[in-house]
Image (cartoon, rainbow, N blue to C red):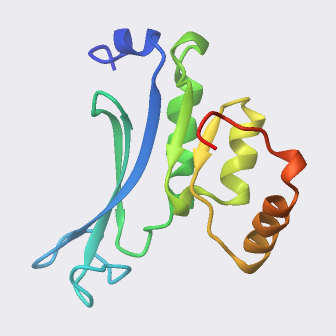
Amino acid sequence: RAVYEPLLSEPYVLDIDNTVKPLYGHQEGAELGYNPQKPGRPSHNYHTYFIGSLRVVLGVEVMPGKKSAGKHSLPGLWRMIDALPAACRPRMIRGDVSYGNENSMLQAEERDQPYLFKLRQTTKVRRQIVCLERDAEAWCDAGDG
């Protein structure tokens, strides 16, 4: 932490991501889980927190193969963010669809932490988007039409 903490005084985006690491042989914590590259092969999941523009890793949690969803890494993420001084917290947290769930967003809002998560386009979400698209008066031109 002493190495990267001086970088955190500048505004930055904290990216969170999950990587599946297929395993060979018998390794601790290896489980059959979501593994798109090698189905049926045991794996670990690396949940990584890093400064987006610098690609500096702030933390990694290694979890068994069945714990690929973003919800499994949230306790570690919030511990890390809560331990940072207010001036060193990220300007925004950015994550993929596995982090775009109600619990993740609620916890970020409780901490007054801005976030940007991809959202699963369920039937209700699609319906809401269509309703928003129809209401042209609610939109304003942002310079690209």
Q: Residue furthest front?
A: 145
Q: Residue at x 57, y 47 (%)?
A: 75
- Percent across and percent down for residue 65 are 35, 73
- Residue 16 lies left or right of residue 127; in this view the side is left
Q: Residue at x 33, y 29 (%)?
A: 53
Q: Which part of the image, by quadrant, shows the C terminus? A: top right
Quarter of image, res 19:
bottom left
Residue 53 higher or lower than 94, as above or below: above
- Residue 74 lies left or right of residue 13; in this view the side is right
User: Between residues 4 and 55, which one lies in front from this camera angle?
Assistant: 55
Q: Residue at x 62, y 61 (%)?
A: 119
Q: Residue furthest bottom?
A: 40
- Percent across and percent down for residue 76 are 50, 44
Residue 72 higher or lower than 144, as above or below: below
- Residue 36 lies left or right of residue 68; in this view the side is left
Q: Residue at x 71, y 44 (%)?
A: 107
Q: How many marks?
A: 0
Quarter of image, res 113:
top right
Q: Which part of the image, by quadrant, shows the N terminus? A: top left
Quarter of image, res 10:
top left
Residue 15 higher or lower than 82, as above or below: below
- Percent across and percent down for residue 8 are 42, 15
- Percent across and percent down for residue 52 are 37, 34
